[in-house]
C-alpha cells in the first residue's frame, strides 16, 4: 500500500510541476496540426493531449519521431523496395504499385508508441528527448504482410534476423545510419506489415511515406519509416541502433525475448508494457460542484488485450471497475470511463490502473533504467471540485 501512496504523491507533485511549467511550444509542420516541439533537428514532435481523445489518432495530429536530420521527400513513382540478403534465395525489387497489386492487402489497428514515451516524467531525470504523454498514437495501418514479401525472395534455412533500412539519413559524416533488425520469427508473424496507408489515407510524409514497417505490440523503434531495403541475414546484426541503443537491463522487464541480440547485461527493448492514460482531464483540473463529470481515457498492452481498468480514490487501498469501451483490436488501445462524484467541494485524488487478459497489471513503482524506457506506472491525478 505504501508504494501506491508514494507513487500517488510523486505523480501529484509531477502534475503540479507540469502545471507550473512554461506552456509547450506548438509548431505546425507541413500537413500537420500544431504539435508540441521537443527538438527541431531531427524533428521530434508530440501529440497534445486533446488530440489523443479519439479512438484513432488523426494523421495530422500523429506524433513525429526521428533520429536523423535528413528526411527526404520520396517520389512514389520512383521509390523502390529491395529485398534480399545472405539468407535469401534471391533479390527482388518492388514499386509501390507492385506491392499494392501483387500481395494480399491487410489492415491492423495498433498502437505506435515511442520506447521513450513519458521519459520526461522520470525522476531523477534521464537523458534523451523529454517526452510527456504524446509520443504515441492509435491508427489503422494498411499494407501487405512482411512474410509474404519475404517468401517471394525465399528465407533460407539458418536465417536469424531480418534487417531494415529507410531513406532518412544523417547530416554529419560518421553518424550511424538508423538500421534495425527483427528476429526472423517476428518478421514472419502474420501481424507484421509493410504499411502504405494510415487511417485509410496514404501514409503521411512525417510518418514514413511511402511505406513503413509496422510491428504491432512492439515499441516504435522497430517501425522503420521510409523503408527502402530488407535483408535476411544468418547472424545478429551488429549496427549501432541494435548493439548500443534501445537496450534495457537484462531481466528487468517482461516481454518477448530477442535471443540473438541478448547479452548478460542488456537486451533489446521489445514489447510495449501494459499502460493506461487519462485523456479527459489533466492533473490540477477544476471541476464544477454539482456538474456531471466523467473520467475517461485509454488502456493498452502488447496484444494480450485489456481485461479491466480500475480507479482508486484512496491511495490504492481499494479499486473499482470502470466501464470499458468497444474492443478495437488486441493491438489497439481500449477506452474506459467512470463518472466522478462532484456533489462535494474539495480535492479528489484519482489513480488509474489497467490489467491485461493474461493477468499482467500496471505497477505502482517505476523500474529504473538508464534510457528512461517503459514508463508505465499507475497514473495519479489531483483534481478539485469547486
Image (tube, helix red, strand yellow):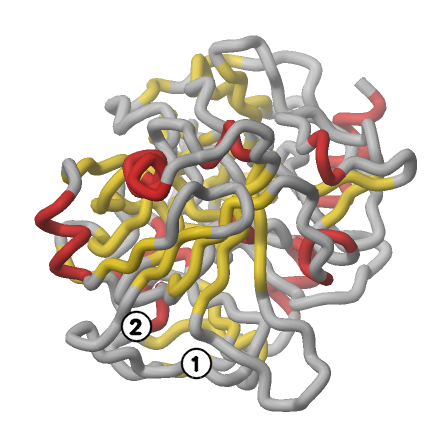
Q: Are marks 2 and 1 in contact (CB under 8 Å)?
A: yes
Q: Residue at x 48, y 71 (%)?
A: 45
Q: Earlier in the sequence, mark 2 or mark 1?
A: 1
Residue 71 bears which disc, if any? 1
Judge whether residue 294 can be spotted in this image.
no
Say above or below: 64 vs 144: below
Q: Residue 375 location, x and y as percent?
A: 67, 43
Q: Residues within 10 Å of mark 1 (few under 14, many from 20)?
A: some
* Disc 1 secondary structure class: loop
Measure how far apart labels 2 and 1 are at the Cα level. Answer: 9 Å
Q: Residue at x 68, y 89 (%)?
A: 173
Say above or below: 89 vs 27: above
Q: Residue 259 location, x and y as percent?
A: 71, 30
- Residue 16, quarter of picture: bottom right
Left or right placement of residue 32 versus residue 241 in this view: left
* Residue behind mark 2: 205
Left or right placement of residue 173 versus residue 188 in this view: right
Say above or below: 224 vs 144: below
Amino acid at each position: 500500500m505504501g508504494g501506491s501512496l508514494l507513487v500517488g504523491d510523486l505523480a501529484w507533485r509531477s502534475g503540479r510541476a507540469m502545471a507550473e511549467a512554461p506552456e509547450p511550444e506548438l509548431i505546425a509542420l507541413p500537413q500537420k496540426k500544431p504539435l508540441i516541439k521537443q527538438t527541431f533537428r531531427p524533428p521530434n514532435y508530440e501529440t497534445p493531449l486533446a488530440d489523443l481523445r479519439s479512438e484513432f489518432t488523426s494523421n495530422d495530429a500523429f506524433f513525429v519521431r526521428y533520429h536523423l536530420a535528413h528526411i527526404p521527400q520520396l517520389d512514389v513513382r520512383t521509390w523502390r523496395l529491395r529485398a534480399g540478403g545472405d539468407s535469401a534465395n534471391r533479390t527482388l525489387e518492388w514499386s509501390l504499385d507492385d506491392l499494392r497489386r501483387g500481395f494480399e492487402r491487410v489492415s491492423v489497428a495498433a498502437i505506435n508508441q515511442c520506447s521513450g514515451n513519458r521519459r520526461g516524467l522520470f525522476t531523477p531525470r534521464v537523458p534523451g528527448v523529454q517526452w510527456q504523454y504524446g509520443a504515441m498514437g492509435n491508427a489503422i495501418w494498411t499494407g501487405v504482410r512482411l512474410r509474404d514479401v519475404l517468401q517471394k525472395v525465399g528465407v533460407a534455412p539458418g536465417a536469424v534476423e531480418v534487417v531494415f533500412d529507410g531513406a532518412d539519413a544523417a547530416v554529419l559524416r560518421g553518424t550511424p545510419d538508423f538500421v534495425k533488425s527483427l528476429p526472423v520469427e517476428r518478421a514472419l508473424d502474420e501481424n507484421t506489415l509493410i504499411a502504405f496507408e494510415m487511417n485509410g489515407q496514404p501514409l503521411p510524409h512525417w510518418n514514413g511515406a511511402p511505406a513503413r514497417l509496422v510491428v504491432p505490440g512492439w515499441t516504435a523503434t522497430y517501425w522503420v519509416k521510409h523503408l527502402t531495403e530488407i535483408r535476411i541475414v544468418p547472424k545478429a546484426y551488429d549496427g549501432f541502433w541494435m548493439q548500443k541503443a534501445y537496450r534495457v537491463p537484462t531481466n528487468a522487464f517482461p516481454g518477448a525475448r530477442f535471443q540473438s541480440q541478448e547479452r548478460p547485461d542488456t537486451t533489446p527493448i521489445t514489447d510495449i508494457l501494459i499502460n493506461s492514460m487519462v485523456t479527459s482531464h489533466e492533473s490540477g483540473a477544476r471541476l464544477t460542484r454539482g456538474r456531471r463529470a466523467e473520467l475517461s481515457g485509454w488502456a493498452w498492452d502488447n496484444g494480450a488485450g485489456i481485461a479491466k481498468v480500475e480507479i482508486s480514490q484512496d491511495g490504492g487501498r481499494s479499486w473499482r471497475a470502470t466501464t470499458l469501451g468497444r474492443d478495437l483490436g488486441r493491438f489497439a488501445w481500449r477506452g474506459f470511463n467512470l463518472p466522478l462524484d462532484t456533489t462535494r467541494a474539495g480535492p479528489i485524488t484519482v489513480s488509474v490502473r489497467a490489467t491485461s487478459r493474461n493477468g499482467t497489471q500496471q505497477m505502482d513503482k517505476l523500474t529504473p533504467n538508464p534510457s528512461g524506457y517503459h514508463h508505465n506506472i499507475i497514473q495519479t491525478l489531483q483534481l478539485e471540485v469547486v
